[in-house]
Image: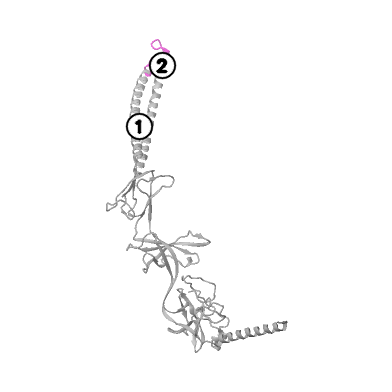
Amino acid sequence: MNRFGKRVVLVIILVAMIGAGTAWVMRSDSGGATSFLTAPVKRGDLVMFISATGTVEPEEVVDVGAQVAGQIVSFGKDESGKTIDYGSTVEKGTVLAQIDDSLYAADVAQFKAQLDLAKAGVIRAQADLGQLQAKLYQAQRDWKRAQKLGPSDALSQSDFDAAQSAYEVAKANVDVGKAAIVQAQNSVEQAEANLRRAQRNLDYCTIKSPVKGVIIDRRVNIGQTVVSSLNAPSLFLIAKDLRRMQVWVSVNEADIGSIRPGQKVSFTVDAYPGETFQGEVGKVRLNASMTQNVVTYTVEVTTDNSSGKLLPYLTANARFVVSEKENVLMVPNSALRFNPAPNQIVPDSRAAVAGQSNSSSPATAGKSGKAHKAEKVGPPRGILWVPDGSLLRPVQVVLGISDGTMTEVQSDQLKESTLVVVGEERAGETNPSSGGSPFIPQFRGGRGGSSRQ
């Protein structure tokens, strides 16, 4: 085939492709009939909420440790006479465990003997002082006689000096005896202190409950050796009152501004599917944590557990009620996301809606009901589309709160049961379509919409 023939073939192929494209465009514009998916405007109650997860925790727990080292030789008995274990109910002072006390008992016996020895030392010092005082009395009388005689033919100078020296020595010995008594008494006090310490260590061998409550964790077994150091080893974890529980919920920093003490909270746990528990916000902890650049705050939610169903450390899915409204008009969020093609709009309304889009209209809440405030003038607005014959007419609405599925709307042109468009589909197609190229994914929400709720 020569060059001219190749050109003819290429022109024929190009003309065929243009003709096929024109036919496809004409068929997509005027071909199969388009039907709109509609939903009625409803009237009811709407709740805006924040969703988060947390953990069920006892309201107040006491960690019972050991202050001495030794081997666990036995456990105590609970109120029913059973050995202390998980779930045991205990009173204040109930014996929880016994540590081997043989070494500490020996220390007590040793310091008792030292105390008795020190007390005997006091008695001996007091007796010695009596003897020294008697000698002082004798030396004092001898010195007085020597002073009367003086150095003379009756009393030599050496005897005079000896009498004086004996008196001074006896007087000093009395002071020494008094000091010995004080020293012996201090030894008694020291021995008593050592004995008290040894007795306290011996008492620490018996682990007792400091509060009334329920054992929720037992961390030792019989035969296990506990080693006491700067940090006391933990043996038992006691919850004071399981009738009051807390849910520690991690709330994102973007939502923490909507949380306040006393706010109503509902939550569920996987252990009881279909059952919802109620609580309220107790406090917001200020010590935020950061995980992968996400800042979260721990919110304490208090709840009543008189039924005893809630167990410690269950995972809770919580919903914080941010806002509630009763008897309001509301529409599905997909209706606010729908945007028709220009040729589907009533002609006299096209100019009014030119350049407007609903793709971000329901911005007051996402699926989790989280509120995201943005700087704007006046309340947020959106557009709904209502059927007008074979075309659509726009209705301007003021947006209110949203629960992630339905959004509150306000308009004088809407009333309960008014049909609004949420999507479109073409005759003969199995899936709803918004028109456009067959290579572009189609969404039920309409042009410019999204499949997310």
- Quadrant location of residue 178? top left
Q: In front: mark 2 or mark 1? A: 1
**Residue 216, x across and y down, in percent:** 36, 55
**Residue 394, x across and y down, in percent:** 52, 84
| Mark carried by residue 162 | 2
Indicate the secondary structure of the residue bearing disc 1: helix
**Residue placed most toward the observer, 57 or 111:** 57
- Specify the principal SS of the magenta part: helix
Residue 226 in the magenta stretch? The answer is no
**Residue 268, x across and y down, in percent:** 39, 66
Residue numbers of the magenta segment: 143-161
**Residue placed most toward the observer, 225 or 371:** 225
| Mark carried by residue 118 | 1
Q: Answer yes or no: do the residues labelled 2 and 1 have beta carbons within 8 Å?
A: no
Residue at the right extreme of this rendering: 3
Q: Give the residue type at disc 1.
A: Ala
Q: In which quarter of the image is the N terminus?
A: bottom right
- Quadrant location of residue 169? top left
Q: Distance between the residues labelled 2 and 1?
A: 37 Å
